[in-house]
Image (cartoon, coloured by chain):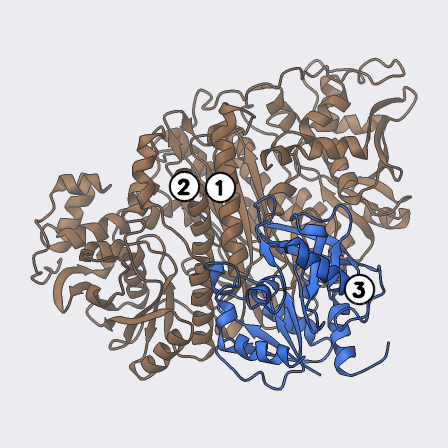
Amino acid sequence: MKFGVLQFPGSCDEVDALEAARRVGDAELIWHAERDLGGADAIVVPGGFSYGDYLRAGAIARFSPAMESVIAFARDGGLVLGICNGFQVLCEAHLLPGALLPNANLRFTFRQLELEVLYGGGPFTKACALGERLSIPAKHAWGRYYADSDTLAVMDRSGQIVLRYAPGQNFNGSLHDIAGVCNEAGNVFGMMPHPEHAVDELIGGSADGLKIFESMRLTIEGAVV
Amino acid sequence: MPVDAAPRAGVGTTPTVDDALALGLTRAEYELVCEKQGGPPNQVELAMYSLLWSEHCAYKHSKKLLRTLPTEGEHVVMGPGENAGAVDVGGGLVCAFKVESHNHPSAVEPFQGAATGVGGILRDIFAIGARPIAVLDSLRFGEPAAGPAGARARYLLDGAVSGIGHYGNSIGVPTVGGEVYFEGPYEHNCLVNAMALGLAARERLVRSAAAGPGNLLILFGASTGRDGIGGASVLASAELGAGGDGDLDKRPTVQVGDPFEEKKLLECSLELLERGLIVSLQDLGAAGLTSSASEMASKGGVGIDVDVAKVPLREPGMEPFEVMVSESQERMLCVVEPANADAVMELCAKWEVNGSAIGTVTDTGRMRVLRDGELVGDMPVAALVDDCPLYDLQPQKPSEPIYGAPPATAGLTLASTPRDILLAILSSPNLSSRRPLFEQYDSIVQSRTVRRPEQADAAVLALPDGGALAVSIDCNGRRVAADPYTGTVEAVLECAANLACVGAEPLGTTNNLNFGNPEKPHIAWQLSESVRGLGDACRALRAPIVGGNVSLYNEGATGPIYPTPVIGIVGRLPDARRAGRLGFARAGDQIALVGALRPSLGASELAKLLGQPLPDGLPEIDIAAVAATQAAVRDAVRAGALSSAHDVAEGGLAVALAECCLAGGIGAQVELAEDLWEAIPRPAGGHGAPGPRSGSEPPASTLLATALFGEGPGGFIVSGGPDALRALGERVATVPIGRVGDDVLSIVEAGATAGTMLTLTLEELAEAHGALGELFP
C-alpha cells in the first residue's frame, strides 16, 4: 500500500511520519501546492507548525491545493490520519468535529504519555485491542480538545472517541480526556500525540505508535484480524 | 599607502570624532579609520567601521589569546574562522557545531533575545551546508527566590525558556540538552548561550569566501527593517545600565525572530546547495549586511559592490547606513554565477523567500555601497575586516576578592544532619530537576534522539550507520571564579565526563567565553588564565577547539559576572544501542565509586548554601588520571557491561547517588567505608573519625560533609553485575559501595562504629528534587 504524507511550509514531523509509514508500506511526500495525491491509498497530515501557526494552527494549511484534494479523497471514503498539527488542520477543514484550544497551562509541553484505546475496531486501531494502553509522546501548545456537549454526546454514541489519555496523563485539559477522534464514517482520524515518534524502541522506548500505521495497512489490504 | 576613497554622494553631513565616540570607537581608532580612508569617513562608512571594529565583531581584546588554543586534530574537517566548525563522524558524514551568546539582548527582552540567539546559531550551521539536528542551551540568572527579590530572575528565566522553545520547536530542531545556574553575580547580566549541531555529507560542506569577480550577490530570506540597528556595538560592547528606563530605551535594538521564515530559509539554502547552484553562502547576524558582505569579500580576497536600493525593505525611507547595519533576522547572502541566477530565484520563489540580486563580486578589493547606482560608501575590505587594532590584555591577579560571599540559607550549618543537607541541596535552584524547563522543548523531532534530557548525562543522537553522536554543554562559573585556570579545566573535564557516561569519545570542542570588562586587569587575568586552562585541557583530551564565541563586558554597577567559559563537546559512540543511562536499573546490581575522587568543600554547592566566601584557588587536578578514568568508564559502557553510569559533580557523592535513584525510580543501600575518608585532603591539625554515634542520625562534621557533599573532578557512580565491576577495577580504582534495591536511599557508615548517615524515601527525594516546578505554575 502507499501512504501520501503532506508537506506544508513549516511542517516539522513530515519526514518522521514518512519514515514511520515506510516501515509498513510505501510512502511519498506530497507538496502542499500539488493537487495530485500520487495514487496514495491513505493520507497522513503531519505535525509541525504549518504556515508558522499564523492566524490559528492549521487555519491556512486547510486551504492549500493538496488539502482540497484530501477533502475530496476523504468524502469518497479514503483514509486520512491527522497528527497534532494535522489534527488541527482536519478540524479547520471540518473533516473532524470540534477544535483544539491552547493547553490549560498555556505552555508548550512535551511528555511521553499513556493512551487508552476506546474503540478497537476501526481502520486506525484495528491492530490494537480494546482498552489497550499505548505509550506515545505528545508535544504541543494547542492540544486541548473541545466540542460542545451535544456534539460530544453524538460522538460518544457513534464510537468516534477513539483514544483518550489514561488517568493522570491529560496535561492539556482536553474534555473527557480526549486524545484522538474520528468522523462519523470512521475514515478520517485525528490524534494529538505523535504515533510516528513511537515506532522504534531505540528511539523513544516504545513502538506502540506503529500499530496506528499497521492498522491502516490492514484496512487497505483488507486483512481480517 | 592608503588609497583615497572615490568621491561619494553626500549623505548627510560628515560625522565628527564625537559621533565616532558615541558609536563606540576610541579616538585612536577613529584616527586610524581616517588614515585608511584618506580622509574622514562619511555616515555610511563610519557606521560600518564602528560595527566591524566593535568588540563583538572584531574580538579586539581576545583574538591574540584565542590564537593560543589548539585547533587541529585528526577528526577536524573545518576549524575556527568559518560560520561553524565541523568534525568527521564516520560514514561519510560530518557534524557541524558551534555555541554563541546573546546575553545583552536577552537581558533587555528575554523571549526574543533567546529566540533570536537560537535562530542565529542555527543559521551558522546551515550556512556551511549542514542540516541542523539539535540545539542545547546554557543559561545563567540571578537567584530566583520567591517574592520581589527573585522576580527579575524568574522573569528572565521564563522568557528565555519560552523563547528557546518557541524558536526551536517551531523550526523543527530538537532541543536535547542544556544547563541553567542561578548565582548572584548574574543578576544584572544574565547569560543566554545557544549551541547547535548539524549533519552534512562531507562533500556538501561549503565555505563563505566570495569568489569570482562578475558573480552576483543574492540576498534571500526575510525583508530588511530597522531591527537591531546599532545592536552589536551599542549593546554588546557596553556595560549595561542599572535597568529601568535605560533598558527600555534599548528595547528597539533587540531583534525579533520568526522561526517560520527561518524554516523556509533553511530548506531553501539546503536545496540550493544540494543542486550545486551557489558558490558560497553566509548568514546575516550581528552587523547584518555590513559584516556578511565584508567578511565574504575578505575571505575571498575580492571586492564587493552592494546597491541598497535593491534590498527588499519592510520599512519605508531607510537610509543607506540603516540598510547596511540592520540586523533583521532570517536572511542569507549567497554568491552565484550569472548562469545560475534564474534557477536560484526560482528556488527562492518556491520556498516563498524574497530573493534579490543586490550586488556583484569585483576585483577591486574594496567594499562599495551604492544607492540606485550612486556611490555612497567606499572602503578597503582589508581595512574593515583585517586591520582593526588588536589589544594586549594587561592581566593582574586581584589582591582582594572580587565577589561577595553568597547569601546563607537559613537554618543550614555544617552541624545539620546529612539528611537535611541533602534535601537542601537537592531542592536548591542549581540542583533541582530541570524537567519544568525541558518539558517546554521538543527533544525528539527528526527521530534521532536516543537519550532524552534526564535519561543520561549527555544527549545521544542516532547516526545512520548504527553509531551515535553525544553532546553536552557545561560550566560552573562559581568554581571558575575561585580559580580561573583550574575551574576551566574542570569545565572541560566535566563535559568530557558526561560524554564518557554514555560511552562517547570527544571529537571536538566549542566554547563561549563570557567575561566582564577585559580592560580591567583582574578580568584580563580571569580571561587569560581561563584560556590557558581551556587550551591545556583540550590538548590533554585531544578535543581541539573548532569554533566558538566571546562575550565581554558582562558587568554593571554591581560588579562582573563570574567568569563563565561555557564548554560544548561533541563525541561519538560506535553503537547507539549501548548508549549509557544515568539511573539505577536493576535491584541487586552492585554500586561502585570509580576514579580518584578527592572531594573538597571549597566553591561547592554546600559551601554556597552555607554562605561561605569563595576560596582563593581550587585543588590541582591530575588531568591525565582523570582522562584515564573517563576512558575506562567509556569503554565499560560501550561493552554493555554497566547498568548505569553517572559522574559525581555538583553536590558531590550523596547528590549523585540521589540522582541515580531518582532517574531509575529505585533505591540504593550504600555503605561508605572509613578508607573513603582518606581521599579527603585533611586540614592542618587533622580531624578524627566522623562525629559521635548514638544509633540515630549524627550531626555532620566538616569531614563527613566533605565526604558526602564535597566536589571535585574524576569520580563516577556506576552500577552493574559484580563481574563487570571487578573487570573495571582492573583498569581504574573501583570501590564497591552498595546495592541497588528497595525504595529508599540509605547511606550508612561501614565498620565497627556503623551508623546511619541518612535515609530518604524516593518520594521525599522526588519532592525536594521537584522544587523548580514552583517557578513554572
Q: Are marks 1 and 3 on the same chain?
A: no
Q: Mark 1 — residue?
A: B159
Amino acid type of the residue tagged 1 in the rendering: Gly
| Quarter assignment of residue B423 | top right
Q: Check disc 2 and report its element: helix, strand or loop.
A: loop
Quadrant housing the N terminus of chain A: bottom right
| Residue A208 in the figure: left or right of residue B751 | left
Q: Are marks 1 and 2 in contact (CB under 8 Å)?
A: yes
Q: Mark 3 — residue?
A: A119
Label 3: chain? A
- Which chain is displayed in blue in the rendered image? A
At 43% across and 65% down in the image, what residue appears?
B127
| Residue B668 in the figure: left or right of residue B236 | right
Viewer-nearest of discs 2 and 3 = 3
Q: Mark 2 — residue?
A: B109
Q: CA distance from mark 2 to mark 3?
A: 48 Å
On the question of residue B476 being in view, the answer is no
- How packed mark 2 is, by other alpha carbons closer than 10 Å (few <14, some 14-19, many 20 or more), is many
- Which chain is displayed in brown in the rendered image? B
**Upstream in the sequence, badge 1 or badge 2?**
2
Q: Check disc 3 and report its element: helix, strand or loop.
A: loop
Q: Residue B53 at what x, y percent from top left? A: 27, 48
| Quarter assignment of residue B465 | bottom right
Q: Nearer the viewer, residue B627 or B741?
A: B741
